[in-house]
Structures are given as structure tokens and as C-alpha cells.
Image (cartoon, helix red, strand yellow):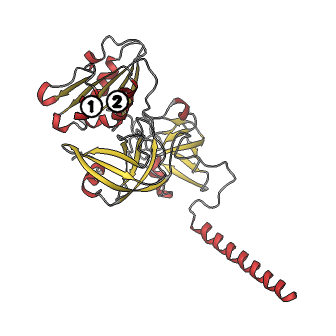
Amino acid sequence: MALPRLRTVVLVSGAALLTRRALKRRIARSPLWPLPALPEPISGHSKRRATAVRKLLITGRTEVADGVVQLRLEGPGLPPWSPGAHLDLVLPSGLVRQYSLCGDPEDTGAYTVATRLVADGRGGSREVHEQLQEGLEVEVRGPRNRFPLTEAPGYVFVVGGIGITPVLPMLRALAASGAEWRLLYGGRSRASMPFLEEIEKLGTDGNRVTVVAQDEAGHPDVAGALADLAPGTAVYCCGPEPLMAAATAALPEGCTLHLERFSAATGGTAGSGEGSEAFEVELRRSGRTVPVGAGQSVLAAVRAELPHVAYSCEQGFCGTCQQRVLEGEIDHRDELLTDDERGDSMLICVSRCRGGRLVLDL
């Protein structure tokens, strides 16, 4: 009986030794070791934000307007989404860009996005148009929704160009429910306006849709579209900054305005400039402290130590770089976070510190 017992002891001891060695190798590879005893990290996302990264297969690629490509991304076990939501696409170069979901929420096996080629942009749309083809896999994060369709007695949508993508699922849902809604849809030309045929069919009942092509009729009359709205009407606007500024200026009293930006507002405060003094940031979980120069963003300083930290727009409107703040007073310079989120988090691409020190949950 002694021999079997001895063999068992040897096997158990050997397995324990291998486990300890594997753990040591994993610890050595981790840039965040040793970790202090803190609660589970929530950095980079709010409670409403899905951050899991998954690979989806591009199974469809269609040009839905001049310069606009629609992609169908399929995969198993996709999280549900609601109108107004968007995905983060991790492009082959490593760039991260946000694209609104414009398909059907009931299509649980795929996500659909569309993007316009911006020739003088920062490269994301060109990469989508030139490199993302059927049969390739692409990494995505999300979906997330910062532009949800709220309950209201009536709705007015003011949209420009590719800004129709988050609005289209809303229009389908409202048309199916019998709700009161109207749409003012502007673009450079009818050929450049995606999903135009479907939208005009949705608005056939009651002449709900007004299409204004700039090469035919100039700019849309935003003030006229928002005149004499009933109190409580929800106004949704997505498109170029001048269109959003016009909607903001013309909003009647008693109505609510919901904006979705694809770029930073004109004149927005960047991460450096007036009031941008140097300070330091403690990265609590990694046990490091980094200086942030007067002309440097927190994001740039942090990524010099932790290159894996995600980011995208670098202008304070997409939310990819949102991080939890454990200590310190935040100088918020973004255009996205809610008052509740501003209490304990910041967008590190633009926001800074009021004082000499911040502590991040990183």
C-alpha cells in the first residue's frame, strides 16, 4: 500500500509545482503586477457600457450611397442593442472608430454599420473603405448607447448625411408603433444620402419626411422644422456641427434636444491650452506615477506607461478612453459624460486635473 500512496504524493506535488511556475510566468508578463487589494476595476466603462472584445465576420459589403459603405458583421451570441447604439470597430491598423448600428435589433445574429469615406479625415473611414472586405474578420467592442430613443408624445429628427445611421432604427420603431414623428433630412445631393428610398417609404403616411438636397434647394430650414412644436416633443439631431448649432438655437421651450456627434464641437476645449498646467497622475493598480506636462494629454502620459489603454477620437466625444478616478479634482473638458459619470470618471484624452494630482483606477 505504501507504493501507491507515494506515487499519489509525487503526482500531487508535481502538479502543484507546475501550477506555481505557470502562475509566476503569468505574473511576470502582467504589466499591472502587483495589484493592490482594490474592488473589481471598472475603468474604461460605465455600468451601461459593454466592453467585451469579439471577432465578427464581414458577410456583406454594400455601397448604399455615393461614398457610403454598409457592412454586415456576423457572429454567435451577440449582445442585444437598441436604436441609437453604436459599435467600436478595431481596424486592422489598430485604430478604433465608432459606427452607429443601422440594422434591425431583432436580427440577433449580425450587426450592421455604415460609414462615409472622409478623404481629409484621420484615416479610419479610408481604412474601412479600402481594407474591410467580405470574408475578413474584424474586432468589435460594444454595443453601447449614448443616444437612446426616449419616451415622448412626439418626435422631430433633424439629420444631415451619414447622421441618418443612428436615426434609421428609431424611425423604423416609431413607424411600427404608430407614434407621431417627423424627419428633416439634408445632404449634399440625393445620391449621397444613404437609405433615402427606405426613409421616404417610411414617411409616406402623413408626409412625415422632408428631404433637402443641397445641390437642389440649399440648406435645410432647421428653425422652420422646429417652429411651434408641442411641449414635450423630443428633438433628435445628428450631423455636421452647423446643423447641431442651428437645432440648439432653434429649440422651442419645453422640448428636449438629443445630440449625437461624429466629431468634436467647433471651439471645444482640447486637452491642452488655457489653464493646462502640469500635474501628476498616480496609476493605482500598476503602482506607477507619471507626470503630465502642460502641453500633454493624460492619455499620452498614461499610454507611455500602459500602451494597452484604449482610445479613439482624442477629442472628448466618443468615450473610449473613459477611466475611473479614485482621488483628485477633475477638470472636465469633454462633451459626452453625464453629470453622474463626471462624479467619479473622466475622459483622459481631453480632461485634466484641478490641482496637482489625480489617482486613476489603472
Residue 349 visible in the displayed image = yes
Tell me the amino acid under the disc marked 2: Leu
Instruction: Measure the C-alpha gap from mark 1 to mark 2.
Output: 8 Å
Q: In this rendering, would 42 be left or right of 90?
A: right
What residue does disc 2 label? 171
The percent coordinates of residue 219 (x first, y second) are 19, 25
Q: In this rendering, would 347 be left or right of 32?
A: left
Q: How busy is the neighbourhood of tag 1: few (under 14 within 10 Å), some, or many (20 plus)?
A: some
Residue 271 visible in the displayed image = no
Residue at (41% x, 45% y) in the render: 87
Element carrying mark 1: helix
Extreme residue in the right direction: 1
What residue does disc 1 label? 199
The percent coordinates of residue 40 (x first, y second) are 64, 49
- Quadrant of the rendered image containing residue 232: top left
Q: Quadrant of the N terminus?
A: bottom right
Q: In this rendering, would 69 be left or right of 340?
A: left
Q: Tell me: residue 19, above or below residue 79.
A: below
Q: Tell me: residue 245, above or below residue 348.
A: above
Tell me the amino acid under the disc marked 1: Ile
